[in-house]
Amino acid sequence: MRAGSAVSRRYPSIGDYGFIGDGRTAALVSRDGSIDWLCLPHFFSPSLFAALVDVERGGRFQIRPAEPYAVSRRYRDDALVLETTFTTERGVLRLTDCLVLLHHSPLMNELQPSRELLRRIEVLKGEVNVEVWFAPRPDYGRRPSSLEWRRGLGWTVPVNHGRVLLQAECPLEQAAGAALQGRLRLQVGDARHFSLAMAHQDMLVAPPLGEHAHQRLLATMEWWRHWGESFSYSGPYREQVFRSSMVLKALTYALSGAVVAAPTSSLPEAPGTARNWDYRYCWLRDAAFTLRAFDDIGFHQAGADFFSWLLHATRLTWPELKVLYDVHGEQPQPEQELSHLEGYRGAAPVRIGNGADEQLQLDIYGEVLLAAYDYARRHGALDRFESRLLLGFGRTVCRRWREPDHGIWEVRGVPRHYTYSKMMCWVALDCLLRLHREGYLDIDVEAFRAERDAIAAAIEARGFNETLNAYVAVFEGDEPDAALLQFVRVGYIDAEHPRMAGTYKLIRDRLMENGLVRRYPPDFDGLAGEEGAFGVCCFWMVEYLVLAGRCDEARELFEHVLGFANDLDLFAEEIDPRSGELLGNFPQAFTHIGLIDAALALAGVDSGEEDSND
Amino acid sequence: MTERLAEALLWGLVASAAMITVLQASVGLGWSRLNLPMLIGTLFTGNRHRAIVLGMVVYLIGGWLFALLYFFAFAQLGHGSWWLGGLLGLLHGLFLVVVALPLLPHIHPRMASDVDGPTYYRRLEPPGPFGTHYGHNTPLTALLANVVYGVVLGAVWPFVE
């Protein structure tokens, strides 16, 4: 384990990154003004900058003062436009970063590149010496980087099936190792722009710099402002809920409506270990949570788009469901290890592709049918095609629920009978029965009810440990699983039921540390290293407490967990309960969905209290 | 006469479709970035989406007109066959790659030039020598597409004649 060594000191903390996106790809920007992660042209494409997982070989694009500085950051005017302000002894420099979004803008009538990363620097006070470092490393640094000067256009770099073009309002010269460097001295009021445009299977377009570039930045802010008009939530923690919805929007692939779990790959779940996975895919597991989150905060179209993608994506594998799909509904590429990259803080291997798609995870049937149930209730109907798909999934549940699987946490190794998986199979059939009862589709009620009841009987007989007075992770086991907090939310059992109260107590006693919740005990998955607390589980605990009527405790826990977000209110997948550092891929949709759901649960309590006061 | 013209137009459409298929396939396979509909469409509009649709329409109309020229050439030569069509296509392609593409920065209202660089209106990447800025294989794929176009027209000449 190399964490804590010189290797780890060369990497910023995960929470030191800011995030920008355009619904097609995303970039991570460090507090030092370095873009350390950018895949082009899509989330799932090979990286151009990947210093995030290898500071030497990954590639980066950095703009910062050439003298010591202090940093503050914020998103500008509710837009995913990141402002990093550097304060030096002699001046203040502001760096503004965005991935340009111009749809519905009159600027679309002039030729625009299909992707553009725009960076603007301006001196707000005094004077600042600025240094620029541009070191592209296409294809995760696997192919040689060649910079080519196109007279009149700028510097270009070939990438997979395309080319990127860097234009800068300052002279850049070639440095050793296929990089460009520049230094400039700016006075108060000076501004400069840097544009990185990409052509994918297309000719390059060189967007103009100067005031025109500033106009594109303002148009991007206007795009986000327009999008934010649909945000209808006005309850407590509005800022954090809005930020979470912005993250979800940026992680929603604009061309299909799919939501990727995170824009990064191989940020470790535990420092210096091999718990590194590629999250640039769509997990069906997130379906019900995502759909409900979108709908509850006013983004009904996004919810409908996501449901449409869900049914489209699952058509090829129907009536079976795969664990994850790519944004186009295809199976992910096979998992590969990039052995030439050292990994974030030395946490090798760096993986691309995801092997979890080969696992059987029965809980996803429940999550998909729960999403369908929510969708039908909100949109008033299911068409014949949708009904047929859902029925097929229900029959698969009846046929397969007795099989062992890999569970919600995708534990590698021998399949086991996970209680959460059985519970979600129960949910799947229960949703079908409810859809039938409410007139959305016709099913063989007796057959489905018999299977549903058989699942409940199995859970009660084998998933409940009498000695511990709690539901446990695996049938006939004795270990807790934080996912079981969802028993209440999905309607399986009341929060006050003694069996559920016992389950909560077991989870609290065995999985909570420093007010944060791990998903399972440290040795449960058999992998080396101890992972952190799981972001979404912390928020599930809040929801459970709300449903159990323990609202003050819930609010206290919620605010405690919010305190672990970074300065931009962003969460990764996990949190180290001892150091408070963010762990795992970043930012993580599932965690932000959990945040939205927990805030909505608390808001429901608040509005209920107001009603009762009226 | 009308019937022959209709046949000429039909085969002109088929040959144009074959040519654009070769060009677009070479783009999809990563051999070239020459997007001909966009190149043509941006002569008329800066809106990328409109440009691609408009460019495709203009390209097909151009394909028809050139088909009539090919048929006229076959008639003048008193002979038309797949190899003669291919030869004409090769010459046509060479003209495009060697003469027409390098001229584009001077006549295309939205194309930057290698000398002056981009301006507010002129943003499109210039093709460079023989179109190689759009990928080193661009001259070859452009020639191949034109040869395919000529072969189709030459092969159907006996039916149109």
Image (spheres, coloured by chain):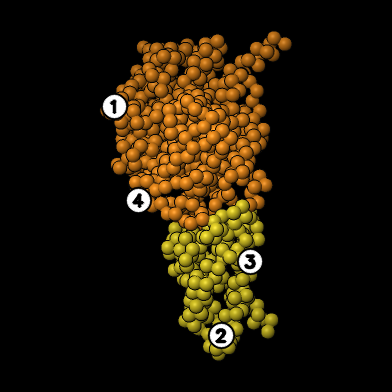
Chain colours: A orange, B yellow
| Position of the C terminus of chain A by quadrant | top right
Where is residue B136, by image quadrant? bottom left
- Residues under numbered marks 3 and 4 in contact, where contact means CB atoms less than 8 Å apart: no
Please tell me whether mark 1 or mark 3 is closer to you in this view. Answer: 1
- Amino acid type, mark 3: Val
- Looking at the image, residue A18 lies above or below residue B160: above
Q: Residue furthest bottom?
A: B78
Q: Quadrant of residue B11?
A: bottom right
**Alpha carbon of mark 1 to alpha carbon of mark 2: how far?**
77 Å
Crowd band around label 3 with a 10 angstrom C-alpha radius: few (<14), some (14–19), many (20+) = some
Q: Nearer the viewer, residue A384 or B57?
A: B57
Q: Position of residue A533 (x, y in %)?
A: 41, 21
- Counting from the top left corner in percent of width and height, residue A2 is at 28, 28
| Residues at discs 2 and 4 in contact (Cβ within 8 Å) | no
- Does the image show residue B63? yes
Indicate the chain on which mark 3 is placed: B
Residue ID for mark 2 = B74
Q: Position of residue A210 (x, y in %)?
A: 58, 44
Looking at the image, is mark 2 or mark 3 earlier in the sequence?
Answer: 3
Nearer to me, B123 or B66: B123
Q: Which residue is mark 4?
A: A144
